[in-house]
Amino acid sequence: MKAALGVLLLLATFPVGVLGYNAYVGYRMNKDLPKIDRDPATGIMKGAEPVFLEADGNRAILMIHGYIGSPTDFGRLPQLLHQAGFTVSAPLLPGHGRDPRDFSKTTSHELVHFAVEAYTDLKKSYDHVTLIGLSMGGALGVIVAANHIDDSVDRLILLAPYFRIKHHWYYLLPAEIHHKIASPFIPYVKRPGMFKQVYNKESLPYLVDYDFISTKGTTAALQVSEQAKQNFAKLSASESPILVIHSKKDKAADYKATHEIIEKLGRKDVRLVLLNRSNHLILWDYEAEIVEEEIMKFISEPEVRDEKTIV
């Protein structure tokens, strides 16, 4: 009897709690979003603009940023690559960098199509195109590379790639299940600043991303991840060397999923670097210089060995 009453009480209070939370988030969005500094012509948040740095020669690098992020995810890496003689393109993904409500209208198909077109456009002008993807951008990078085997990327670099959400004991159930249950009722989630995925808090002022997260947008990101996992096996036929850098202390994307998927690939030209002091945004955290050095070494060395390094 008590158990039944408890269930009835939960069912009665759930709608009230959801309505209250949605009202709070809606109020905060209406209050906070107008205060964000934007380009009046494009609506893009200041600092989230696409990056294009042109250089002489026929080598280019496409950089695809992460979920709810912007090209700022890459820190100073675009400038370092440009100084090394590469043309660098870091576009802004659909639904990103403007208003979180835009992300609620963005589908996984649009994200994938955008990434494929960005690569195709660069390939028209440059013989050699390296692809760097961070987080969801890493998943998009896998899809692009897997579907361009005959016209392969020069090199593929995956930074904290998103193949599975990191599980924490207090979730009880996988985060994907929580999302599936809650998303029909909660359109947006307010993300406190303390949950920005970087341990070096001095980096926080330089990050340009969303503080309000669309659950429909999250569904699109989950679909991109699933598509990337389905496409990863195709890379066994690719001649593109692969570098993967992930932190064992990443609280957003599970590095174990990354390790598992690489092991199944069975290739000899995949280099895996595991970090120990960084969170998800590894180019803004305590080992950012190590990440930069590994990338610069990888794009310049003539051959890549199958090797795992923990730093």
Image: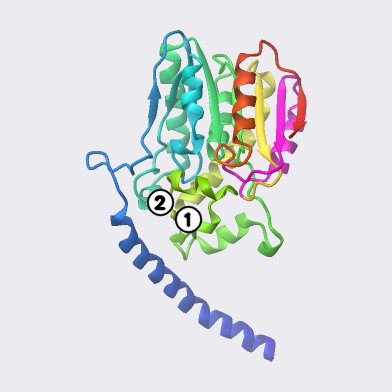
In this rendering, the answer to whether 190 lies above or below 53 is below
Question: Is residue 259 within the magenta segment?
Answer: yes
The residue sitting at the front extreme is: 202
Q: Secondary structure at mark 1?
A: helix
Q: Which mark is residue 74?
A: none
Residue type (three-letter) at the residue carrying disc 2: Ser
Which residue in the rendered view is the most extreme toward the bottom?
A: 1
Q: Quick one: 146 or 164, which is closer to the camera?
A: 164
Q: How many marks?
A: 2
**In the rendered structure, which amino acid carries the disc numbered 1?**
Thr
Q: Find residue 180 and report its horizontal and vertical position in percent.
A: 56, 58
Mark 2–mark 1 Cα distance, whole angstroms, equals 7 Å
Residue 272 appears left or right of 193: right
**Figure check: 233 above or below 175:** above
Quadrant for residue 154, please give it.
Answer: top right
Q: Is residue 9 left or right of residue 71?
A: right
Q: Residue 297 at what x, y percent from top left?
A: 64, 19
Q: List the residue tagged with mark 1.
A: 215
Q: Which tag, 2 or 1, sits closer to the chain's start? A: 2
**Can residue 139 be found in the magenta stretch?**
no
Quarter of the figure that contains the N terminus:
bottom right
Q: Is residue 236 above or below residue 56?
A: below
Q: Identify the residue at image location x=45%, y=55%.
A: 213
* Residue designated by label 2: 104
Q: Which region shows up in magenta?
A: 252-281
Residue 225: quarter of image: top right
- Nearer-the-camera pick, 30 or 184: 30
> Quick check: marks 2 and 1 in contact, CB under 8 Å?
yes
Residue in the foreground of this view, choosing between 54 and 253: 54
Tell me residue 6's x, y (percent).
63, 85
Residue at screen point 69% across, 58% down:
168
